[in-house]
Image (cartoon, grey):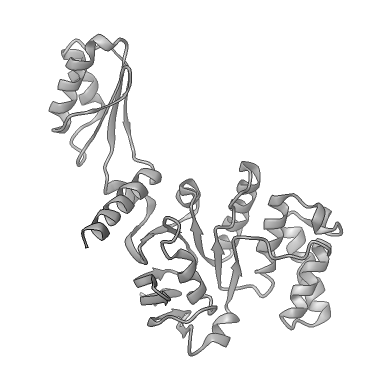
Amino acid sequence: MAEPIVVAEGLHKRFGGTHALRGLDLSVPAGTVCGVLGPNGAGKTTAVRILATLSDPDEGRARIAGHDVVRDADRVRALIGLAGQYAAVDEKLTGRGNLRMFGRLYHLPRRQAHGRADELLERFGLAEAADRQVAGYSGGMRRRLDLITSLILRPQVLFLDEPTTGLDPRSRGEIWESIRELVADGTTVLLTTQYLDEADRLADDVAVVDHGRVIAAGTPDELKATIGDRLDVVLEEPSMLREAAAVMHRLAGTDPAMTGPVGLSVPLTGDAVRLADAVRELDRAGVAAADVALRRPTLDEVFLRLTDAARRKETVR
């Protein structure tokens, strides 16, 4: 197999007494979205800054398309785009003026800079607002403009550091659609986010970062499978709670947890229990259930389980 387009190996970074990265490893295949998740202070932004040549690692190495981010920093910068947490556009300029300015800063000839600005404004739905001052843009429009400024040079790899922070659901959806279009064209996206649903919907692979290292990686479905499904039962009346709990214990091998006055939930291991099994066993026990469901865990639940385990391990150390 070809080498992944983004590779980080054993990255360490310290800021005074703070050890921000502690041996972070990452591998991102070309043409995919990698979601990087982690609590505040986990090291996500530090890792992005190193990969984007804005900071050097104290130890370890990283490569973009085979180029070392320290030794070949100029070459790497020609291959990447970066959109940070906050829009970096000039509010006094129009949307078109911002893109033309960035094109010239990237040393594009004037005609090429103007043409690229028009192309991006049309493609990402900002053509009608192109000649309005950015100060009058909504938050979502500003973030979209900030995103496309990072695309002027057609980057092979795009780093998005929490691109939808503070946006309303409609604006977030517009940014998501823009990201999908980029990946369809072959751009590789490394996305840091605190919105777990964002990673679930966009990412081909997810890396969970905590205490400066990757503590789990895989597709969203693979990470969810590490927890397993849950059996959720809602009873018609609370008098059957004991009988229902006994049935669920037999099926799962562990005691269920209460999820409400008439609700019970129990984790399942493996694929041994089917929905039909649960319904049949509850019926045999005379338990009247208003609802019985097998539920996949959310990425939020995976994230909390993994980071809680990592925190306990750090406490022990």
Picture coordinates of residue 7, whole percent (x, y): 41, 75
Picture coordinates of residue 243, whole percent (x, y): 17, 15
Task: Note whether 268 is above or below 19 in the view shown.
Answer: above
Picture coordinates of residue 235, whole percent (x, y): 30, 15
Q: Quadrant of the C terminus?
A: bottom left
On the picture, is 246 further left or further right than 187?
left
Quadrant of the rendered image containing residue 117? bottom right
Quadrant of the rendered image containing residue 124? bottom right
**Res. 30 visible in picture:** no
User: In terms of depth relative to the viewer, which is nearer, 263 or 173?
Assistant: 263
Q: Which residue does the image show at 72% across and 59% down from the upper left?
A: 123
On the picture, is 56 further left or further right than 102?
left
Q: Which residue does the image show at 71% across and 80% down from the upper left?
A: 106
Q: Quadrant of the N terminus?
A: bottom left
In the rendered image, the residue lying farthest to the right is: 131
Picture coordinates of residue 287, whole percent (x, y): 22, 12
User: In terms of depth relative to the viewer, which is nearer, 147 or 13?
Assistant: 13
Task: Note whether 173 is above or below 149 in the view shown.
Answer: above
User: In terms of depth relative to the viewer, which is nearer, 217 or 213?
Assistant: 213
Task: Note whether 208 is above or below 252 in the view shown.
Answer: below
On the picture, is 59 further left or further right than 314?
right
In the rendered image, the residue lying farthest to the front is: 17
Q: Which residue does the image show at 22% across and 36% down from the upper left?
A: 268
**Res. 149 visible in picture:** yes
